[in-house]
Image: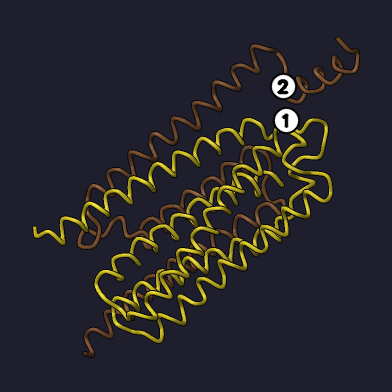
Amino acid sequence: MNDVELKRDKVQLGFWLYIMTDCMLFASLFATYMILRGATNGGPGGDELFSLTFVLVETVILLTSSYLCGIANLALRHGKRKEFFATFGLTIALGIAFLAMELTEFSHLISEGHGPATSAFLSAFFTLVGLHGAHIAVGILWALVLAWALYRQGSNEDLQRKFGLFSIYWHFLDVVWIFIFTIVFALGVA
Amino acid sequence: MKKVLSAYKQERSRYTYAYLLAAGLTFAAYALVVGKLLEGTTLAAALLGAAALQLYVQSRYFLHLDDKKETPRWRLVSYMFTWLTLLIVVVGSLWIMSNLNYNMMMSPNDMTKYMLEQNGKGF
């Protein structure tokens, strides 16, 4: 193994460790949410506050973004510049659309008087879903920086490796969302 | 050149199948809830089952955890271990807290109501 490969392996290990610890962070917030979901302090619960159809649209948007990110990763490694920029551009645009929908939902809840300070249930809800949203926001920034670098420098081995890390991060956020969709929204509305 | 092209298309169609499968599972979960096809524990079990299936699909086809060429083995092993720890944390927390509520002989909602009543009386 030469120096470059060694460095690549170290970065891969470090990044994967970060993803796994992030999993644990989300797991503890999921546990907190599941315990506090009934503690509505006399206010309305998830069945009255959430619209599953709205969340379904969000879910499909994020899933499509995750899928297109995988396609962009493939296109990049096969040297298909046009397809890469088309799919990666859509990945970012859908990520922004998802974030905009989530912020709309949050501001709607807060303006109706269901902010995070209302009850333990809503504190847990805003912490869990808000942390996921914050990850998405960071991911969008990361993606924009990557897109700019790839546009300026063209594809090279180093940027392909970096893009591989980004695609893991983006897929991971969609995996977390499966459980937010199921546990917070689907089970919350049912 | 032709061979490279077909490899790309082949990999791309794997992604597309996985995407359609994941979307299908999401729509199924949505239909179960909105159509009120199941209730209570059965519904919860079905939804968690759909989520677990989608987790499998995405881990395999998006994160490539099964791909021996592309993904080092330690990644799959650490992923499984993380999931094990995660389940212990989540299931353990739920178990402990429900046991606590049982010992308090009150549901969390009754507890809140009780505390609100006590607050109303003043200390």
User: Residue at image x 64%, y 57%?
Assistant: B30
Circle 2 is placed at which residue position? Answer: B107
Quadrant where the N terminus of chain A is found in the figure: bottom left
The answer to whether residue A164 is left or right of residue A48 is: left
Q: Amino acid at mark 2?
A: Ser
Q: Is residue A19 above or below residue B93?
A: below
Residue B34 occupies which quadrant of the picture?
bottom right
Cα–Cα gap, marks 2 and 1 = 10 Å
The residue marked by circle 1 belongs to what chain? A
User: Residue at image x 32%, y 74%?
Assistant: B11
Circle 1 is placed at which residue position? Answer: A39
The residue marked by circle 2 belongs to what chain? B
Q: Is residue A151 above or below residue A166?
A: below
The answer to whether residue A16 is left or right of residue B45 is: left
Q: From the image, state whether disc 2 or disc 1 is nearer to you.
A: 1
Residue A183 occupies which quadrant of the picture?
top right
The chain letter of the yellow chain reads A
> Could you tell me residue A185's position as x and y percent?
66, 49
Chain B display color: brown
Other residues around mark 1 within 10 Å, as few (<14) / some (14–19) / many (≥20): many
Label 2: which secondary element: loop
Q: Amino acid at mark 1?
A: Ala
Q: Is residue B99 above or below residue A32?
A: above
Quadrant where the C terminus of chain A is found in the figure: top right
> Could you tell me residue A4's position as x and y percent?
16, 62
Farthest residue, direction right: B121
Frontmost residue, A147 versus A72: A147
The answer to whether residue A139 is left or right of residue A18 is: right
Farthest residue, direction top: B123
Q: Which disc, if any, is residue A79?
A: none
Frontmost residue, B34 versus A147: A147
